[in-house]
């Protein structure tokens, strides 16, 4: 398909649907959910009903079956209303992608169809208390016993864990084997031995829930292992190759909201006898924010397009996620600066954008890891 920037009629329809839902249903609740750390399950159910959840699940298994670019278009709209709610809505895509990538047709039929037939949440379990960046060093053990594996260990910072009914869990048969020992499993919530720890009290994205998952002698049947023994690490990395790009789109949505608020304010607020937008220092900020937002969206769309064309886009996905989230922090920071003292107050929306954007630099691989991936992938061209 040639490169183009005009959205198709279908994409415009999706964008309008997501934008309306974001504006009319998510945005009015965003501040309260942030202040009280509420998990607005009715909004997530509504997202499911509208087809805005399970975006990456093929339609034959009950999902929306959307291309990654379409997912990014939706994500930007949702995140412009609330970053935290968007993370909870997107978490199913992250948790389910290992099944899309590593599951057999029988597993997809058995696991995805009932999951997608009604509202359910799923969680992706890779990160552990002892470390998240070095994924191959995970410690959760998977011990084969007859026709099942027994899992023991802990996963931390797991999005939607308190409400999830399904978990994709990465565990090792031998930590000494690093990536070659890692296996991927699908574990239903009601499996004996699986429990959820205390919910985290987060700085931002407070409408999403985050908790530890504890596994004590959790028996998982062989038929719930995705791929073969030792293929779990590759499945996790390939999952992240496609889910980091929507995090770029999520950052774009938050940053866009911050820029829109700051722009409107700069045209209303006056100082020294004119609108503050007419002061060069403020106009320059608006210009820089606009440039960074545009670049972020283009990088995100490029990465999504490459994935949709079937390319391995580790480099471009990491660039999109890293640049967009760093840019979102700068844009949100400048939005607060344009609002001055008001921007620092919770009565105005901009300080929330900054707190929400911060997580985009950390989750789905800290930006330090993205830079490691970018450098490694780029240097391969000269090796
Ligand atoms: N696709 C396919 N295969 C890949 C791959 C990819 N993208 N990346 C690596 N591999 C393969 C390699 O080719 C290699 O295989 P061979 O030995 O057969 O060649 C194997 O996997 C090991 O790769 P590396 O040597 O590159 O592995 P590493 O140990 O050096 O680590 C890393 C690489 C990129 C730093 C990885 O550890 C990483 O991505 N860490 C960050 C983890 C992360 O992003 N966690 C996020 C958790 S989810 C979350 O945060 C979401 C949420 O809550 C909402």
Image (cartoon, helix red, strand yellow):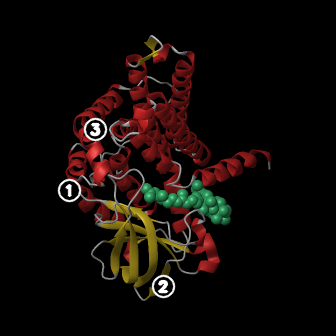
- Please say if the residues under marks 3 and 2 sit with CB atoms less than 8 Å apart: no
Q: Is residue 77 left or right of residue 48?
A: right
Q: Nearer the viewer, residue 224 or 282?
A: 282
Q: Quadrant of residue 17?
A: top left
Q: Residues within 10 Å of mark 1 (few under 14, many from 20)?
A: few
Of the image marks 3 and 2, the number of the one nearer the N terminus: 3
Q: Position of residue 236 (x, y in %)?
A: 51, 61
Q: Nearer the viewer, residue 265 or 187?
A: 265
Q: Secondary structure at mark 2?
A: strand
Of the image marks 3 and 1, the number of the one nearer the N terminus: 3
Q: Which residue is mark 1?
A: 118
The residue at the point 39 percent across, 72 percent down is 213
**Tag on residue 27?**
3
* Gap between marks 3 and 1 measured at Cα: 24 Å
Q: Nearer the viewer, residue 353 or 183?
A: 353
Q: Position of residue 346 (x, y in %)?
A: 35, 42
Q: Nearer the viewer, residue 31 or 339?
A: 339
Q: Position of residue 234 (x, y in %)?
A: 55, 62
**Which residue, as the protein is rendered here, is positioned at the far front?**
272
């Amino acid at each position: 398909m040639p490169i183009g920037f005009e959205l198709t009629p279908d994409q415009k329809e999706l964008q309008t649907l997501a934008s309306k839902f974001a504006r009319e249903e998510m945005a009015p609740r965003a501040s309260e959910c942030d202040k009280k750390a509420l998990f607005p399950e009715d909004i997530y159910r509504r997202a499911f009903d509208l087809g805005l959840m399970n975006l990456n699940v093929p339609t034959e298994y009950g999902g929306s079956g959307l291309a990654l670019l379409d997912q990014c278009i939706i994500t930007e709209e949702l995140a412009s209303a609330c970053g935290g709610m968007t993370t909870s809505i997107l978490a199913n895509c992250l948790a389910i992608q290992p099944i899309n990538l590593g599951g057999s047709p029988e597993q997809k039929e058995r696991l995805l169809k009932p999951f997608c037939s009604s509202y359910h949440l799923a969680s992706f379990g890779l990160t552990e208390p002892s470390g998240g960046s070095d994924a191959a060093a995970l410690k959760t053990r998977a011990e084969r016993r007859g026709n099942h594996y027994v899992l023991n260990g802990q996963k931390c910072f797991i999005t939607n864990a308190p409400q999830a009914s399904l978990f994709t869990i990465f565990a090792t048969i031998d930590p000494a084997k690093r990536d070659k020992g890692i296996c991927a499993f699908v574990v239903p919530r009601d499996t004996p031995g699986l429990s959820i720890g205390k919910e985290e009290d987060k700085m931002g994205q407070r409408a999403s829930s985050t908790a530890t998952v504890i596994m004590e002698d959790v028996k998982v049947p062989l038929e719930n292992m995705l791929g073969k023994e030792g293929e779990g690490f590759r499945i996790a990395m390939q999952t992240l190759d496609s889910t980091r790009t929507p995090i770029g789109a999520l950052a774009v949505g938050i940053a866009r909201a911050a820029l829109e608020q700051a722009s409107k304010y700069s045209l209303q607020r006056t100082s020294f006898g004119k609108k503050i937008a007419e002061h060069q220092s403020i106009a320059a900020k608006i210009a820089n924010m606009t440039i960074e937002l545009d670049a972020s969206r283009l990088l995100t769309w490029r990465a999504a397009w490459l994935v949709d064309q079937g390319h391995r886009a580790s480099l471009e996905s990491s660039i999109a996620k890293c640049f967009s989230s760093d840019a979102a922090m700068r844009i949100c920071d400048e939005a607060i600066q344009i609002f001055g003292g008001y921007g620092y107050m919770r009565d105005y929306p901009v300080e929330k954008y900054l707190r929400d954007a911060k997580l985009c630099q950390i989750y789905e691989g800290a930006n330090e890891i993205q830079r490691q991936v970018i450098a490694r992938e780029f240097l391969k061209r000269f090796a």
